[in-house]
Amino acid sequence: MRCLITGGAGFLGRHLAMALLKNGHKVRCLDIYKPLWGNKDNVEFYKGDFSAAHLVADAMAGCDVIFHLAWTTLPQTSNEDPDFDIVSNVQGTVRMLDEAVKLKVKKVIFMSSGGTVYGVPSVIPTPETHQTNPTCSYGITKLTIEKYLRLYSSLHGLNTCSLRLSNPYGEYQGVNSIQGVVSVFCYKAIMGQTIQIWGDGSVKRDFVYVSDVADAMIKVLDSPSTGYEVNIGSGKAVSINGIIEYIENVLGKKVHRQYSANRPFDVPVSTLDISLAREKLNWEPKVDILDGIGRTARWIEKSYLKGEAGS
């Protein structure tokens, strides 16, 4: 099948594209940045902003499946400008869904957020049936798109699925970002820099290795089910302090830490129940956290100590 990946030049898009190509599919990428990977023989590229309706329509033409990964905001900063979040993400996605109906696209797979749509969970691990009370605009807009996907599935028969992703990490993730704890911390530890920790480090998150995420997206591609949401994570909680201890274990050295005040939007624990993914997709993660951190650290050492980051 020909698959369009919006946000295809990013961290998740890169791994998804490689997995699709490996499985014999054709890949088309829509992004404001041209990917450093791929070539004109195996990946088509459309350069531009997701808000450009005509560009998105052109990129969708002839595609069987849309993987919608493009997003303009982050959980940490989305509350600063909810209007921008709505205009740039919700409106653009609804236009894309209208176009998908016109073009008779076979399936739309949306990358939602298991870390924000539930808000402060009352059940750990958190199942898809848990109430949704997002505490940031990012979570609200992700949840809104989920609802529109269900609506278009019901009204137009569009085959849809929303993946409520936890915290992905691994090779090719940015190391100077305000998100991506594992990669950022690994980089700082390798470079001998101090790691800044918000709060006392007891906050727990569900970290899932990126190759497992790509595998889940491939599984959804082959699933006949439609109009549902499914958690994608490790199903296990690891504290921020625990991540640092794993990094110290991998690198064989202590790292420098600096603790500061809590952030108001950080929920104490966020771990996803992945039973439905096992049932519907026959999927579960294969890479455990220690192995995943080891792979990430080795990639950072190769890329940044040997100058191969763009490869």
Image (spheres, rainbow, N blue to C red):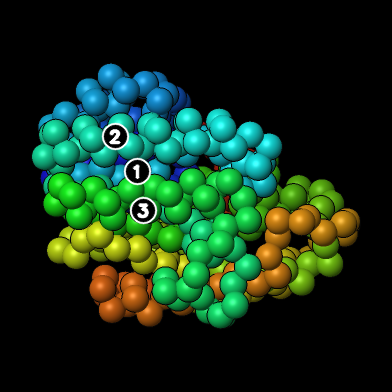
Image location of residue 134, percent across then percent down: 57, 57
Marks 2 and 1 sit apart, C-alpha to C-alpha, by: 9 Å
The answer to whether residue 77 of the structure is visible from this angle is: yes
Look at the numbered discs 2 and 3 and tell me whether their residues touch, using CB distance below 8 Å: no
The residue singled out by tag 3 in the image is 147
Secondary structure beneath disc 1? strand
Secondary structure beneath disc 2? helix
Q: Nearer the viewer, residue 250 or 283?
A: 283
The numbered mark at residue 142 is: none
Q: Residue at x 56, y 62 (%)?
A: 133
Amino acid identity at mark 2:
Met
Marks 3 and 1 sit apart, C-alpha to C-alpha, by: 15 Å
Look at the numbered discs 2 and 1 and tell me whether their residues touch, using CB distance below 8 Å: yes
Report the side of 52 relative to 180 (left or right).
Answer: left
The numbered mark at residue 96 is: 2
The residue singled out by tag 1 in the image is 68
Q: Residue at x 41, y 67 (%)?
A: 231
Q: Residue at x 27, y 51 (%)?
A: 151
Q: Residues within 10 Å of mark 3 (few under 14, many from 20)?
A: some
The answer to whether residue 25 of the structure is visible from this angle is: no
Image location of residue 143, percent across then percent down: 45, 53
Q: Residues within 10 Å of mark 1 (few under 14, many from 20)?
A: many
